Amino acid sequence: MILNTELEYKGNLFPSRIISYKKDLDTLYFTSVNNVVLQVTIQRDSVLRFRYTTASIFEKDFSYSITKYASKGFNHLEIKEDDEYYIITTSKLICKISKVDMRKSIFDAKDTSLIYEDELGFHWEESYEVGGDIVKMSVKSQESECYYGLGDKPVENNLKGKRFQNWVTDSFAYDRDTDPIYKAIPFYIGLHHQKSYGIFFDNTFRSHFDFCHERRNITSFWAEGGEMNYYFIYGPEMSDVVSNYTDLTGRPQHIPPLWALGFHQCKWSYYPESKVKEIANKFRELKIPCDAIYLDIDYMDGFRCFTWNKDHFPNPKKMVKELSDDGFKTIAIIDPGIKIDHEYAVFKEGLEKNYFCKRADGPYMKGKVWPGECYFPDFTNPEVREWWSNLFKELVEEIGVKGVWNDMNEPAVMDVPGKSFPDDVRHNYEGIHCSHRKAHNVYGMQMARATYQGLKKFSYPKRPFVITRAAYSGTQRYTSSWTGDNIASWDHLAIANLQTQRMCMSGFSFIGSDIGGFTEQPNGELFARWIQLGVFHPFCRVHSSGDHGDQEPWVFGTSITNIVRKFIEIRYQLLPYLYTAFWRYAGEGIPILKSLVLFDQEDSHTHYRNDEFIFGEKILICPIIEQNAKGRRMYFPQGRWYNFWDRTVVVGGEEKWVDADIDSMPIFVKEGAIIPKYPVQQFVGEKTIDQLELDVYFKKGNESSEVYEDAHDGYDYKKGRYSLRNFKQVGKKNSLTIQQFKSGKYKTSYDTFKIIIHGLPFKIDRVEVDNEEIDISKLNGDVTFIVSKEFTELHIIGKK
Ligand code: MIG
């Protein structure tokens, strides 16, 4: 008789009893009777790396995603052994490894609670087809455990009950639940008993994740090749998990130039030159702020990268200069496919230098994309990346393009099954030659990296700006991204909200969607609602395929234009707030958007919420994602929240109705927050900021807020030329104190703050700044006054 369990485990192989163990500084090796070696590296007290080989020795250790800046070192390490287990203890974790079957369990060192436990643990299947193993891991799901992360999956925040794969795919008009799509970010977060941990499965082969889908109490992940190689990252706070994950896989190498956080307008395609200018002029005429305009593939000569169609763009340098004089940065698209054309310099050079990808037996990897038949640079070869980076010299240094948009870098190939390269294509992979099975998921990442290197070189001393469609873990170091070819539908507005939150939770915060939808056309209402959400996304760009009509802010009638302008103006006012959030993300890896569960994991109401999120540290956003809505119900996290529009206060911890007609949306500010604002500008740098507005939202108790500023471009900030202000608000029944702590050597252009106090619960007797009394006035019922930016303590004293 065949038992069910035998059937289930058929083909699977398991490590057997551990017979030896050795320690080498921060790394331990456990070897089983059947020659499986488990390598455990103590990366940090809260981060353990597990790596297995079934061949008794490991291949060269290399990862595209782990940054050389990743922190290493621990405060405490102790290894004990009893009859059943090896026990590794750090200051944060206890990891037990069973001697009989190599299964692991991990506990919080403080309270010894169980965080993670192997079910079958590591097991594998031999792959007769291609050699090596299909490597698998299965983990017990703990009581009420929820799962988050995994990059750009277009599904609800909580991944429980679902199964996914990671294989970077061009996904024109994808929909809810389409899987996989453009990005492969094999990182998830588990949350149970109010504690969070993360798993980063650093394996670039096609990988799979099952969150209690196949078996209700088991989570598993596996890959079709390579090593079982993953990091266990402990929080217990979810934001610490994300921050530790970006410590490993990297954070943006610099803060973006402030203009890149402005509003961007794009379309497939604006051409000829007169059309580009007409669009740009219209923004200025209608006074809708805009910082960047895009050139999609039609600017090129027959879709040849690094060329121009001279009929449509006779003098690109002049055009770019004129746009720049009017406050617009020009951003140009560059795809990976290089047209097979023996008269075309880029093709000729790539061919001569042997830079194009080849099939297993030697022929070139030939594929059809926009230019027709193409060859494709092997971006996993460092020499190719160097070559590619230098191709940007003319475009950036000479013509003055300020940003480059990398598209089709999955790599996308037309008219073939799988929409990409076949598996046998060979790659250099930093000299560890391999097939496309291993290189596929990092191809786009390495293209974006090479593009970034070029932009960095030729934009110097300004900061580079790159956008990519494809990504693997770690790509956030080089570039921003968008969520690909979405659809102008109400459900896609909700999906855009989910995807951007998920990307932020997956360590990649510089993200946005094609506002209004790429395919099909939104009506004015949908467009307005999408703008309302989009201005709160780190990357804010309208883009559309253009086959269903125009999608500029003014094409839906005056009332929609006015709403769009109003919301883009809010974004421009909040630029110093967003920039501060970016500084925190680039520095500490704190996500710019925080899903409610990340904001307050202890409140179980947040575990299944999808729509609401925190923008930066203090602003609660809930988009309207339904047609004809006059408002909606939303959940307010614990605490007190000021309505951004009328400053009324809502007490959190429950769902409430909020009015939000088409010209409004639910925006709330955490009490105690101090929100910095710039005046509305038509583009970044239009005005010299001669005063910083500080919106103070009174709170009984303490709250800190920060404002980070620098030259908004260039690298001086890395040498200490930044200005960081920390404001500490202490509100009492009859007084309010604000203390300022400053650091950094940057001198801001303004000398004063305009302070506006909201929600003061008492009548003012006097206001003292550094012990001197000052004049105050009223503005719409709020108290306002002007103080020197150098103040250290501000004291508002109530009437007795
Ligand atoms: O096959 O360059 O996602 O943003 O406008 C379509 C044309 C190629 C896909 C991108 C889209 C871009 C379009 N591209």
Image (tube, grey):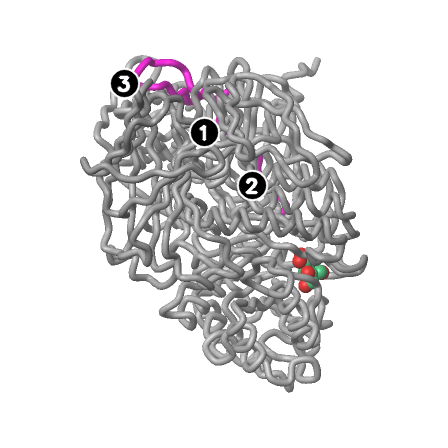
Q: Residue at x 40, y 46 (%)?
A: 693
Q: Could you tell me which residue is drawn at 51 percent across and 65 percent down?
A: 403
Q: Nearer the viewer, residue 131 or 619?
A: 619
Q: Measure the alpha-carbon separation of dots 3 and 2.
A: 39 Å
Q: Main secondary structure of the magenta part?
A: strand
Q: Amino acid at mark 2?
A: Gly
Q: Are marks 3 and 2 in contact (CB under 8 Å)?
A: no
Tell me the kind of residue under disc 1: Lys
Left or right of residue 631: residue 225: left
Please indicate whether residue 265 sits to the left or right of residue 45 in the image.
Answer: right
Q: Position of residue 612 (x, y in %)?
A: 58, 30
Q: Is residue 111 magenta?
A: yes
Residue at 42%, 24% (x, y): give it. Answer: 102
The mark closer to the camera, 3 or 1, is 1
Q: Which residue is mark 1?
A: 670
Point out residue 358 in the picture as x, y percentages from the top left corner: 60, 67
| Along the viewing direction, whichever of 9 and 712 lies nearer the viewer | 712
Q: Secondary structure at mark 1?
A: strand
Q: Choose mark 1 or mark 2, whichever is in front.
A: 1
Start-end of magenta stretch? 104-131
Q: Position of residue 737 (x, y in %)?
A: 28, 29
Which residue type does callout 3 highlight? Glu
State if disc 2 and disc 1 touch (CB < 8 Å). no
